[in-house]
Image (cartoon, rainbow, N blue to C red):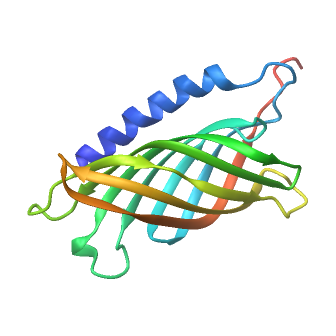
Amino acid sequence: MLKALTFSALLTGAVSTLCAQTTTTTAPQRLGPGVGLYASGTETGMGLHLIKDSRWSMEARFARTNIFVQSETGSWVTEASLLYRVAYHEKVRCHIGIGPKADFQVSESLSDRYGLSFPIGVEAFPFPFQNAGLFFEAAPFYLTAGGKDINYGIRTSSGFVFYFVRQDKTK
């Protein structure tokens, strides 16, 4: 688990650095980073969403597979994705992306796996306050353990996302 947390911290640092270069400067941002809670799907965990009010964003997530059933066979999953919002509306954001993914196995007999993830998702903001919403994502992925033990499939997650309101510093 320590390897997964260290890898997640490194991915979060990389996400922050890259997103600082992709934000727009034409208008002040109302909302800052956000937190995603993924309560259902193939992975259960949480993530950091870097920005809501931009076409480009990044997300880093830390999750656990098989948390409810056969928990001794699951893995800790870290993922960082560069996202592009193909549909950008007030109440709905649809995105596609790409990024590295790592599975750190719980069982000592299995090898850790590394690869790529290709997320496709939707954020919906049906509430009167626009900093909280619902989240759904499906992501085809490809993982390998040193060229052997190839694993591929589709990861799904759904849950809630909450973006923090930025304070205006000009007051």
Residue in the foreground of this view, choosing between 7 and 103: 103
Q: Quadrant of the C terminus?
A: top right
Q: Quadrant of residue 43?
A: bottom left
Q: Is residue 157 left or right of residue 66?
A: right
Residue depicted at x 68% and y 49%: 95
x 51%, y 50%: residue: 118
The residue sitting at 22% across, 73% down in the picture is 72
Residue 36 lies, in percent from the top left, at 60, 55
Where does residue 121 sit, x and y in percent of width and height?
65, 57
* Residue in the foreground of this view, choosing between 99 and 21: 99
Q: Is residue 111 above or below residue 11?
A: below
12 relative position to 67: left or right: right
Specify whether 128 is left or right of 63. right
Name above or below for residue 70 compared with residue 1. Answer: below
Number of marks: 0
Q: Is residue 31 left or right of residue 149?
A: right
**Residue 42: x %, y % from top left:** 45, 70
84 and 40: which is toward the camera:
84
**Residue 85 placement (x, y as % from top left):** 72, 44
Residue located farthest toward the bottom when viewing the structure as drawn: 69
Rendering quarter of residue 97: top right
Q: Residue at x 19, y 48 (%)?
A: 147
